[in-house]
Image (spheres, rainbow, N blue to C red):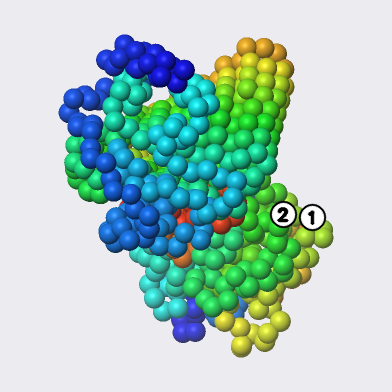
């Protein structure tokens, strides 16, 4: 098991008393990005929320080891401070709290904070949004860029990203891809990378931008298949999730 | 003439001296003393005791460096202590001196506020009182605000104040009023009448910070008349404990295109009872108003009122009242009211009362803030009302005053 910076072992997760995930195993080395596929309602978002540590997602069994620390019982903010970050699909509007304040919170106290915030905003093309209430009246694409701006400020070692390409137009997809790319250090050699990513995708567009090493197919709360993400995507495109599920059922006689 | 008028004011006041107010707990006036000694005039208020100056500073009144102020008035208990002006085109003096100086002032005296409104207005007329007279002359604009401090120093005192503010045509006037007490625990009563007259094309910003103590009862009585193209912008901040506050300042837009904006920040700690609102009557074509209030209870009770009445074509008004309940106790009762009396008016309101949404706290925690830090950030955001029309340094000063009190809330 040596060398894994993230190790999820036999994880079970329940939401409001309902068991959603069972027996999840997932290992990731420093610098790797893994991709989660799976039909709607299969539990992908639930897994990300449970890794991040949202209280509504109760871990019923198993454990999560991050950088050698068992974080299974740590709170959301403790995990964030240890280096786990997440982009929200539908983040809440917080009236009176400016986008600038959120980026500042992510940067923590650093010298030249003001300038750093402005640079980041330029980079995600959101300079005009810094003094607006966070997420207030933001479009789908603007939310994505704002979330990535916060993550670029936070620089998590493990970034959890839920459908980065959904609802994004063709111009923005390349910007978002490029930002993900720099967040996950695609352009530096694997050995030098320190960031990990776990990305949910339906379309696979994002595979053009990130260097994904492993893919998983989630079915009904369990990981049914693990392999090369491009191959998995090709199978899903060709045969649909039904084939993945059938294949999975063939391999698990008790299923 | 003046005598005769004031004679009739006294008669009407006497007739109303037992008249209960329409709203708020009835205060027993006999529990307070109302007369005090004259105060020796202080030509240099920076020589006041350090503790006094510090308390005044907490209410936005700067005595050590008057360069950021265009004038200063200080009333201690029921007597004027100091008044001075640093800029041409502005008059600042004790209201008694102004009445002696200007015969015409009787035309403004008790004209916006009725002397027989209730026993509190009556008491101001019948008891020893002071107050300020602030006037901007036609076409003059103040860069810096005039500051006024109403200071309660004596235990169990009823402080009586009658202010007259006149902004002559096309003038611009900024006022900061800070009200505070010497003692942290002695009981006191503040009765403050303020009459504002905003002439054609004049702009007035009025920022009031109340820093009372948990034993003080406060009954301001304010009315404002805004003429054509005039602007009245009020910012009210109450973040320190107070026993009982009831106020419902009323603005009448008498001229076309008059505009009014109220921003209020109310915080009620356990033991505080606040009943505060803003009322705007739109009586002329294209008059408009926006009323914004933020109420937080950490255990006290708040009634947050708002009333807009549209009586002329093409008037526009919006009322926004948001309340936050921090901790388990306390109540917020939001009462937004709209009244329209003809077609072609546009009045609306929104009100929301609740606790901080857990989803918002978690969003900030996912960025690494602790629960307490996340809560504090959200509360700070809640209290941030972006104020248009206030000079930037005044807005910054107001923001600082709010931030200074935030720590007490958390
Ligand atoms: N708060 C909740 N209460 C009850 N059930 C929930 C809750 N959140 C998720 N679920 C259920 O858990 C299952 C997995 O949901 P999840 O959001 O993880 O799916 P997903 O794989 O992300 O789907 P999609 O592709 O549609 O985003 C679904 O059946 C969903 O209805
Ligand atoms: Mg999902």
Residue B385 position, x and y percent, is 54, 46
**Residue B205 percent across, percent down from the top left:** 56, 42
**From the viewer's perspective, is B269 left or right of A144?**
left
Helix, strand or loop under label 1:
loop
Q: Can residue B244 be seen in this view?
A: no
B86 to A189, vertically: above or below: above
Image position, residue B127 (x, y; %): 28, 27
> Which of the pair B342/B222 is nearer the observer?
B222
Q: Name the residue under label 2.
A: A141
Are there few (<14), some (14-19), or many (20+) residues within 10 Å of tag 1?
few
Q: Distance between the residues labelled 2 and 1?
A: 8 Å
Q: Name the residue under label 1.
A: A169
Q: Can residue B201 be seen in this view?
A: yes
Q: Which residue is situated farthest in the right direction here?
A: A171
Is A11 left, or right, of A35 in this rendering? left
Quick check: B155 above or below B191? below
Label 2: few (<14), some (14–19) or many (≥20) C-alpha neighbours in 10 Å: some
Left of B325 or right of it: where is B254?
right
Badge 2 or badge 1: first in the primary sequence: 2
Q: Is B9 rendered above or below residue A7? A: above
Question: How far across and how far down the image is residue B389, in percent?
Answer: 62, 45
The disc at residue A98 is none
Q: Which of B328 and A189 is in front in this view?
A: B328
Q: Which residue is drawn at 41% across and 53% down?
A: B61
Q: Is B358 above or below relative to B138? A: below
Residue at image coords 73%, 51%: A167
Residue drawn at x 61%, y 83% is A193
Closest to the observer, B215 or B265 = B215
User: Which of the pair A32/B150 is nearer the observer?
Assistant: B150
Instruction: Report how many numbered discs are placed on residues in the image.
Output: 2
């Amino acid at each position: 098991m040596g060398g894994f910076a993230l190790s999820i072992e036999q994880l079970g997760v329940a939401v409001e008393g309902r068991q959603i995930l069972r027996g999840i195993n997932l290992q990731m080395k420093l610098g790797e990005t893994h991709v989660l596929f799976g039909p709607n309602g299969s539990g992908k978002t639930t897994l990300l929320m449970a890794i991040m540590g949202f209280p509504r997602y109760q871990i019923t069994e198993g454990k999560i080891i991050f950088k050698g620390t068992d974080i299974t019982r740590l709170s959301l903010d403790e995990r964030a401070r240890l280096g786990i970050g997440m982009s929200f699909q539908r983040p809440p509007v917080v009236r009176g709290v400016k986008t600038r304040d959120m980026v500042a919170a992510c940067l923590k106290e650093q010298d030249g904070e003001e300038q750093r915030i402005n640079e980041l905003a330029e980079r995600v093309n959101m300079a005009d949004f810094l003094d607006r209430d966070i997420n207030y009246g933001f479009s789908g694409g603007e939310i994505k860029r704002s979330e990535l701006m916060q993550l670029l400020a936070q620089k998590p070692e493990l970034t959890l990203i839920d459908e980065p390409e959904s609802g994004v137009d063709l111009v923005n997809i390349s910007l978002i891809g490029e930002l993900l790319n720099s967040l996950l250090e695609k352009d530096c050699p694997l050995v030098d990378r320190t960031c990990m990513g776990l990305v949910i995708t339906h379309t696979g567009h994002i595979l053009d931008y990130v260097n994904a090493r492993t893919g998983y197919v989630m079915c009904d709360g369990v990981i049914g298949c693990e392999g090369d993400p491009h191959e998995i995507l090709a199978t899903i495109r060709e045969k649909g999730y039904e084939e993945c599920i059938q294949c999975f059922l063939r391999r698990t006689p008790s299923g | 003439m003046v005598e005769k008028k004031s004679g009739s004011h006294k008669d009407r006041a006497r007739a109303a001296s037992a008249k209960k107010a329409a709203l708020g707990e009835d205060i027993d006036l006999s529990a307070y003393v109302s007369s005090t000694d004259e105060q020796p005039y202080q030509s240099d208020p920076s020589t006041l005791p350090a503790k006094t100056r510090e308390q005044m500073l907490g209410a936005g009144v700067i005595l050590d460096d008057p360069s950021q102020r265009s004038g200063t008035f200080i009333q201690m208990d029921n007597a004027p202590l100091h008044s001075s002006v640093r800029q041409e085109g502005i008059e600042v003096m004790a209201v008694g001196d102004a009445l002696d100086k200007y015969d015409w002032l009787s035309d403004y005296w008790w004209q916006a506020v009725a002397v027989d409104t209730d026993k509190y207005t009556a008491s101001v007329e019948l008891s020893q009182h002071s107050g300020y007279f602030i006037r901007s002359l036609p076409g003059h604009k103040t860069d810096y605000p005039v500051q006024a401090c109403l200071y309660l120093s004596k235990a169990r005192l009823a402080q009586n104040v009658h202010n007259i503010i006149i902004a002559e045509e096309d003038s611009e006037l900024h006022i900061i009023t800070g009200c505070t007490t010497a003692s942290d625990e002695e009981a006191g009563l503040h009765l403050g009448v303020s009459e504002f007259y905003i002439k054609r094309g004049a702009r007035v910003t009025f920022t009031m910070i109340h820093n009372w103590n948990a034993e003080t009862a406060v009954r301001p009585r304010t009315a404002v008349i805004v003429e054509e193209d005039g602007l009245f912008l009020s910012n009210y901040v109450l973040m320190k404990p107070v026993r009982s506050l009831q106020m419902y300042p009323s603005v009448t837009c008498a001229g076309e295109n008059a505009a009014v904006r109220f921003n209020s920040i109310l915080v009620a700690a356990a033991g505080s009872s606040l009943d505060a609102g803003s009322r705007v009557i739109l009586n002329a074509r294209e008059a408009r108003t926006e009323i914004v209030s933020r109420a937080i209870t950490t255990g006290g009770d708040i009634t947050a009122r708002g009333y807009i009445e549209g009586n002329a074509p093409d008037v526009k008004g919006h009322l926004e009242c948001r309340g936050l309940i921090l901790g388990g106790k306390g109540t917020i009762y939001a009462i937004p009211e709209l009244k329209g009396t003809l077609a072609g008016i546009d009045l609306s309101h929104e009100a929301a009362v609740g606790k901080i949404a857990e989803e918002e706290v978690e969003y900030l925690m996912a960025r690494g803030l602790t629960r307490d830090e996340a809560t504090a950030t959200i509360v700070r955001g809640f209290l941030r009302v972006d104020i248009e029309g206030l000079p930037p340094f005044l807005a910054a000063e107001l923001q600082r005053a709010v931030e200074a009190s935030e720590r007490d809330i958390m």
